Image (cartoon, rainbow, N blue to C red):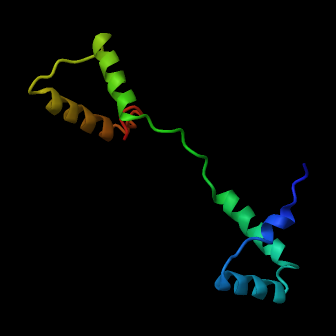
Amino acid sequence: MAYKSHTIMQRVNLGKPYEDYIKRMVKGGYYASASEVLRDALREKMKQEQPIPAPKKTLQQLVQEGLDSVEAGRTVPYTKGLLKKALEQAKINAKAGKKIPSHILP
């Protein structure tokens, strides 16, 4: 089945401010038709669009990863000095210009 782009555009209600703007652009000679104005605007918007990021993990997935790490022995026992030591190391890393590992970023 062939796609008929003109039938879709005939059904779009943009509203007075947008319609007035399109008319001014065509009347001013910037575009030959309303379709050209809309196509150009859509092209510009598509250029600005960022790639869609991968979906974030759910809380359930993150908890399961934590449980799997505990089961695999990839843990450090909590002590009173653990957070202090981690903070000191973070300061050293920041001064050295080291980036924060991606698995730690929110």
Q: How many marks?
A: 0
Q: Is residue 38 left or right of residue 85?
A: right
Residue toward you, 78 or 91: 78
Residue toward you, 93 or 2: 2
Point 36% across, 30% down: residue = 60
Point 22% across, 18% down: residue = 76
Q: Is residue 57 above or below residue 31?
A: above
User: Where does residue 103 sit, x and y in percent of width and height?
Assistant: 39, 31
User: Where does residue 82 sit, x and y in percent of width and height?
Assistant: 15, 26
Q: Is residue 72 left or right of residue 44?
A: left
Point 31% across, 23% down: residue = 66
Q: Is residue 37 above or below residue 26?
A: above
Q: Quadrant of residue 48?
A: bottom right
Point 82% across, 84% down: residue = 26
Q: Quadrant of residue 29?
A: bottom right
Q: Is residue 13 above or below residue 100?
A: below
Image quadrant occupied by the C terminus: top left
Residue toward you, 73 or 60: 60
- Work out which residue is located at the far top of the displayed protein and give it: 72
Q: Is residue 73 above or below residue 67?
A: above
Q: Is residue 36 left or right of residue 60?
A: right
Q: Quadrant of residue 75?
A: top left
User: Where does residue 11 sit, x and y in percent of width and height?
Assistant: 76, 70
User: Where does residue 49 sit, x and y in percent of width and height?
Assistant: 63, 55
- Work out which residue is located at the far left of the displayed protein and give it: 80
